Amino acid sequence: MSSTDARPGETKKGGPTPDDPQAQAAARSAERDAISEALESRLMAIEAAARFHHVELDRDELRYPKGSTPSPASLVEWVRDGGLWCRAVRMRFGQLLKVEVASPVILLLRDGSAAILTTVDPARNIVWLKDPRAPSGDPPVAVDELRLSQVWSGETMLLRAIRELTDENAPFSFLWVWGLVRQEGRLLRDIVYGSVALAVLALVPPIMVMTVLDRVLTYKSLSTLSLISLFVVLATLYETMLGHARRKITYIIGARVDAKITLHVFKRMLRLPLDFFERQQAGVITYNIAQVNKIREFMTGKMMTTVLDFITLIVIVPVIFFIQPTLAWLTMACAGLIAVIIVLFIGPVNRAIGRWTQAETQKSSVLVETLHGIRTVKSLAMEPQQRENWDRRTATSVQLRLEASDLSNWPQTLITPLEGFMTRGVVLVGAALAIMDPASVNPGLIIAYMMISGRVASPLANLAKAMDDLQEVRIAVGFVQSVVNQAPESVNPAAGLRPRFEGNIEYNKVNYSYPGTKTRALDGVSFEVPAGTMLGLVGKSGSGKSTITRLLQGITRDYEGFVKLDGNDLREINLGHMRRAFGVVLQENFLFRGTIRENIIAGRPGMTLTDAVRAARLAGAEEFIERMPNGYETWIEEGSPNLSGGQRQRLAIARSVIHDPRLLILDEATSALDPESEALVNANLTRLGKGRTMVIVSHRLTSLTECDQILVLDKGKVVDMAPHLVLVERCSVYRQLWLQQNRHLEGGGVRASGPAPVLAQGD
């Protein structure tokens, strides 16, 4: 057979053809392996550098789109969340030689891997690199510029310990926001240069008018007029381009500062403890956070304009004194009176605005509360009461707003005639001076001064108004501070132990009281259950069942005694690491807008549809999901109106077990289920609890009969702990609860029936 008669799938030399499916699959597999190996190298390099600073990074905290490699920005965020300072930069080889390698520097290579820079030798023009995958005993490798340029594009990550109070951890304040603006120093410098140039160009029209009146018309010089016209055209073009560039830079600064403020406030809000949100009204928090927009608009809008106007004044004020000192002193006297008026009204206006803002907060609270409880409002026909409450709040807000507006209107009313005199009155004074001393004042000078003084009046008025706006912004800063400056749940989110959990739980003489109460929710609670135990918590309302689970989740750490997980004090464990290892299902669970699949895998990057199906099957949710119009891609709107309470609860259970947690907490998780759904979930409890510790809080004792241990609580104290049958025999509190719920199973517990109902019969 000739070479042209090769078998399908072979080349002329006998190898596989490029379109061979097996060869393509093998190539794709090899490519995936190479990407995976390169990514592992990059992550190992970053972890080694962090370990140098005594920080252990958690890969579960690294967020990046599935099926791709993490970007440098994602890696930087990962390191910063770990508690280190980090920055991604692009460097040249010459800059690399100047780096003081006091700690590992990571070079991100083109193939997705990384190398650790250990030493530089500028004299020999080489650097020493170490492969993070190499054994610890292997020495670094010397690399010159030519070899490094073939694999490195310049992307570098710098890491070090945090040495000072960073912007991220600094308390929110007006000065903090101003610090963000100052970080744009290079752009601000360009704006200042442009503003000075524009202020100088603003003098062109008055000088042109003065020259035309005093020179061109007097001497009828067309050549001078032509030269002035050319100069005016050039100045106008330059002023137009310069103004466009200045506005564009201002917009850029505003967008950057806005993004930084928004990200900072939201991140700080997420770090607040849960009990803060439980104590505060959602409407108040929402309104206070919304004041960030007012602060941002002032800092990047009004204040920026005021600063630019001040630069204009610095340029123009000396000019007006040079043109005519007497008129200049009159202008400055008016400006002084304007400033005095503004200062006198600052206090009263500030207090009036504060009262109105407080009324707006209360009004917003009514709106948010009504939206959150709209089902209750509709079901109880509470629309008239809520409308009356809203009307009353609105009337109060409108009245206080009118009072504040009326008070704020007076300064502007008093300022208006002074502004008018600065622009028009100087003409009259100038005319009087021209009559008395024609040699020193001529018509062209008067017209030029009037035009220039107009440039002075507007910035002075804006400066006065900015002082008024500043008071309102200070109030807004106070509202934002009342939220984001609260003590965070953890001072350093990256601090704490990150152990591997097995599920052993121990409470040792735990005492806890909720803020504002003297009665102990937990009083000397002590018990221990080994890993893999299914533990039930029972007791009357207020006995401390949910409090035990709250402490176990780290929602509060302000308690006496010890709570331990696998022998580790709960307060020493990293909160994020611990909560990611837990699964929690509450009585009322929130579902996000999105598909069923997205809700099940929420917060678990890397999980697939297969994982979602497995979790749904484990939670008993698979059967109703498959009946949905689009299955796992069925869209859930806000409030999940297309799902029943039982369906929402089963989705929440699926969401909690998708990552196979070592400890699962069910806090009244079956209370919203119908009997059929509850029986289905209870039947799956054994499967749910296999290989993990389960803590189940339930008022329905029938759902706890299969638990390994049941902890009985009464008034915050432990009464007994044993399996169901043992507790029925020896624990009076448990036996009483059991009989109350299952009296219908006893022979004599049937209530005597009343008369049989009779249908009314018509005549």
Image (cartoon, rainbow, N blue to C red):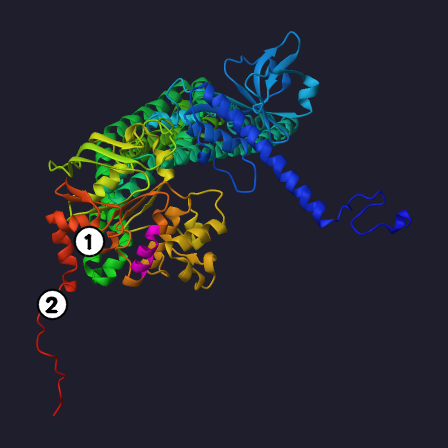
Query: Which image quarter: residue 664?
Result: top left
Tell me, yes or no, if residue 185 can be seen here: no
Q: Main secondary structure of the magenta part?
A: helix
Residue at disc 1, secondary structure: helix
Q: Nearer the viewer, residue 603 or 353?
A: 603
Give the total of numbered labels: 2
Residue 340's place in the image compared with 366, above or below, is: above
Between 370 and 387, the one nearer to me in the picture: 370
Q: From the viewer's perspective, is the residue at label 1 or at label 2 nearer?
A: 2
| Residue 469 location (% of width, % of height) | 32, 33
**Is 348 on the left-hand or right-hand side of 178?**
left
Q: Is residue 529 above or below residue 186?
A: below
**Residue count near mark 2 (Cα–Cα under 10 Å), binned few <14, some 14–19, many ≥20:** few
Residue ID for mark 1: 389
User: For this view, does 327 lie left or right of residue 135?
Assistant: left
Q: Is residue 678 magenta?
A: yes
Whether 254 is drawn above or below 591: the answer is above
The part of the chain drawn in magenta is 677-686
Camera-side residue of 106 and 360: 106
Please state which of residues 332 and 313 is positioned toward the viewer in this rendering.
313
Residue 528 horizontal/vertical position (percent) = 24, 36
Q: Residues within 10 Å of mark 1 (few under 14, many from 20)?
A: some
Q: Is residue 367 magenta?
A: no
Residue 750's disc is 2
